[in-house]
């Protein structure tokens, strides 16, 4: 880092916030997967619906992770 101490601390806090948000995002993704699995087990959603939902959630969380990582690099 080539900035001042204040800029370095701000960048560190930004990294910490991004890391915390990624952890929360991972938790949310796992939680949603558990909900869908439960619904699938009870027959509320089909296997195909569950697979489609899983694919959509994965794509969304991958995009959000990318944005979070990108925001911490700036």
Image (spheres, rainbow, N blue to C red):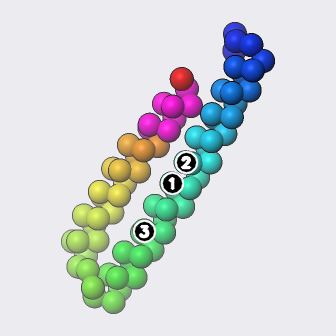
**Which quarter shows the C terminus?**
top right
User: Does the segment drawn in magenta span residue 69?
Assistant: yes
User: Does the segment drawn in magenta span residue 1?
Assistant: no
Residue density around tag 1, few if under 14, some if 14–19, many if 20 or more, within 10 Å: some
Q: Circle 2 — which element?
A: helix
The residue depicted at 66 percent of the width and 26 percent of the height is: 11
Q: Which residue is mark 2?
A: 22
**Which quarter shows the N terminus?**
top right
Q: Which residue is mark 3?
A: 32
Residue 58 image point, x, y percent: 37, 54
* Residue furthest to the top: 2
The residue depicted at 52 percent of the width and 56 percent of the height is: 26
Q: Cβ–Cβ below 8 Å for labels 2 and 1?
A: yes
The residue depicted at 33 percent of the width and 50 percent of the height is: 59
Residue density around tag 2, few if under 14, some if 14–19, many if 20 or more, within 10 Å: some
Residue density around tag 3, few if under 14, some if 14–19, many if 20 or more, within 10 Å: some
Residue 55: which disc? none
Q: Which residue is mark 1?
A: 25
62 left or right, relative to 23: left
Classify 56 as above or below 38: above
Lower sequence index among marks 1 and 3: 1
42 left or right, relative to 65: left
Q: Which residues are magenta?
A: 66-73
């Amino acid at each position: 880092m080539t900035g001042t101490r204040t800029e370095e601390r701000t960048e560190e806090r930004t990294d910490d916030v991004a890391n915390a948000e990624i952890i929360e995002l991972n938790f949310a993704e796992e939680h949603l997967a558990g909900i869908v699995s439960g619904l699938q087990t009870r027959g509320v959603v089909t296997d195909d619906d569950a697979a489609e939902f899983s694919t959509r959630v994965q794509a969304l969380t991958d995009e959000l992770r990318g944005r979070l990582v990108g925001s911490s690099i700036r």
